[in-house]
Structures are given as structure tokens and as C-alpha cells.
Amino acid sequence: MLTILWQSFGFRQAGHDQMNSTTIMHKEIRDIPAATRMLLTDGREQIRAVAAQLRDADPNLVITVARGSSDHAATFFKYACELKLGIPVASVGPSIASIYNARLKLPNAVCIGISQSGQSPDIVKMAQSAGDQGAVSVAITNFSSSPLAKVCDYLIHIHAGVEKSVAATKTFVTSIVAELALLAHWADDQELVSALDSLPDDFERAVECDWPELRRALEGHDSLFVLGRGPSLAISHEAALKFKETCQIHAESYSSAEVLHGPVSIVADGYPVLALAARDASEASITAVCDLLAQRGANVFVTSDNVEHANPLKFAKTSHPLTDPLALVVSFYAFIERMAKDRGINPDSPRHLRKVTETV
């Protein structure tokens, strides 16, 4: 009876090959290249216009307001903005405005509110408060008529189309593509603009890297570390969340620079570790930690060929250090969707969760 029920949703028994999956999450992951093309064509002029306004504003501080996957996108923006523009970025908890009714001093600042739905009252209130206190506010959202879009000075529509699966995939990726496009035009960086234009093709290759060897290695495990550094730390955070919400696996995300400070003490023989290394200045430091953990008995998998003791994972290289982590998350999404089905879990309907979460 259970087998019949799962097959009625397009599943086979757990542990079997699921290549012909028809889950909503699978379809939306496969839609990432097309959604990215749409954003970079239909959204380009809007992004250019917002970038011009921010360039004129010449802020000395940027704050971000977001939760969940959108907050991981905000973490990516932090690293990218600080690396590209030299402007410090701080994440502000929405409860500062929504619960505590505190006012921040934000002259000569920009507030970036990121929300797929643009509906959560706490995010809306914090963005509105930031604007009231002198910040130029920008909404990055999938709904141009959302409350967040209405309270902000400027809107960047991510053009992801309808996303039905509870686990965000294409809206996470397009939110970061929108951020990078904003930074590229803000900085007038044509090399980054060109790299972004190549991303849809990069994503087509990335979605084929679904890491079957990692799926096999995680059989029987319910806990692991996920590592990153720099912009890829945001991808590590996102991956750890997806392990929890789609596979009911406890995953902790750490910077590869932090994991040795204390968390490493729980590493025992065979303990699984996934490290998401991009082709940037952090790769060597990540791979060094991976080899060290492997020598201490961990079963380490890393998206790099530059390791001696850890297990290399296939990756799709892009043409820019800031776009490389995005190809990694597309590969991870392909992996985690299949991992969920291997464990007999419908990734479209994580328990206790719904698509839009509104907090005060």
C-alpha cells in the first residue's frame, strides 16, 4: 500500500534509481537556466536603473533584511558587495523593527530587502523603518505588487515565475543573480556582466552534476558538516537548510576557517563532510581543511580536484569567481532532490512547512 501511494506521486521505492523523477522540485531545478535567462533579459533595464540610483547615492553602508533561503542570498550579497565595491554590509534582524520598535541611524545607507513572496510582516516593517530613517530601500522579490515592493523606493523583480515546491530553488538562484547583476552594473564591471550572461549555459552543465557517490556515502547517516568560505559560505548555509527541510538530516554549516575551532571535536571515523569550494581565493584554504579532516577519519567530499585525501566531486566551472558558487548550488539542488527520494521523502511537501512563512 505504501509503495503504491509513493508511486502514485511519481516515486519508486527508496534506494532505487529515480532518474525519471517528476517532482515539482525536480522541474523547478531544471527551470533554473531558463529563469536566469528571463531575468537577465526582461529584468536588465530595471536592474541598470536601480544600479544607477545606488551609484549616485554613494552609500557607505548597506544593510540586508531577509529570512530563510533569502537570508542566505543576503549573506552572498554581503561577500560580493564587500569584494566588489568595498562597502560593508550588515544583516539586520527584522525583529529590531517588528517586535522591539527600535530605530536605526541609517543616513547615507542602503537597505536591501530580499523575500521571494515579499509578504512577511517583519521584513516589510524593517524595510519600511530603514527607509523612514534615511536609507535608500530596494526590494528584491518575485512579486512586484507585494507589500515589500510597495514600501521600498526601488524594486528588482527576479522573474523566476511561479515556484510551487516548498523548498526554494530557482528563486534562491535568481535572487543572487539579481544581486550580482546589480553589483556588476553599479561597479560598471563588464567582465562580471559577461559572466552572468553565460550563467544559463553554465547551469545547464551544473544540473547534471548530481553527486551519486555522495548520496551513497550518506546512507545510514543523519548528521553532517557542510563547509564553505567567502561567497560559498552562503551556499553552505543554504545546503545545510535543504538537508534539514527536504531530507530530515541534521546538517551544520561552517566556514572552513571556523570548523577547526571546536566543531571538529565531534568528527569520528566515517563522519560525513561536504565542502563547497569555488574557483576563487578561498579554494586552497578549503581543500587544506578537507584533507586535514579526511586524515582525522572524516569521509570528506569537496567540489575541487586539488585534494590528496578528500573525495573530489564533479563541478561546473563558470567564467568568474563570483558566479562559481552559483553553479555549485544548482548541482547541490539536483543532488538533494534525488537524496530526498532515496530516503523515501517527498521533497515537494516537507513536514511542518509551507511555501510562504509570515513572521511578525
Image: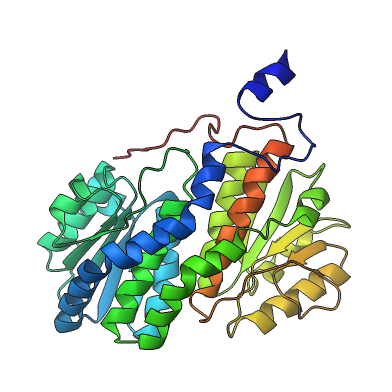
Q: Residue at point 53% right, 42% down? A: 25
Q: Residue at point 56% right, 59% down? A: 330
In depth, the one of 209 and 142 nearer the eye is 209
172 sits to left or right of 324: left
Q: Residue at point 56% right, 62% down? A: 204
Quadrant showing the N terminus: top right
Q: How many marks?
A: 0
Residue 249 seen in render: no
Q: x and y percent of residue 107 in the render?
A: 14, 74
Q: x and y percent of residue 266 in the render?
A: 77, 57
Q: x and y percent of residue 40 in the render?
A: 34, 67
80 sits to left or right of 105: right
353 sits to left or right of 148: right
Residue 191 seen in render: yes
In depth, the one of 299 and 328 nearer the eye is 328
Specify the quadrant of the image occupied by residue 205. bottom right
Specify the quadrant of the image occupied by residue 155. bottom left
Q: Residue at point 12% right, 68% down? A: 134
Specify the quadrant of the image occupied by residue 263. bottom right
Examine the rendered structure and indicate whether residue 95 appears above or below residue 323: above
Examine the rendered structure and indicate whether residue 138 appears above or below residue 182: above
Taking the view exactly as shown, the residue that stands out farthest to the top is: 1
In depth, the one of 320 and 285 nearer the eye is 320
Q: How is the image coloured?
A: rainbow
Q: x and y percent of residue 145 in the render?
A: 18, 46
Quadrant showing the C terminus: top left
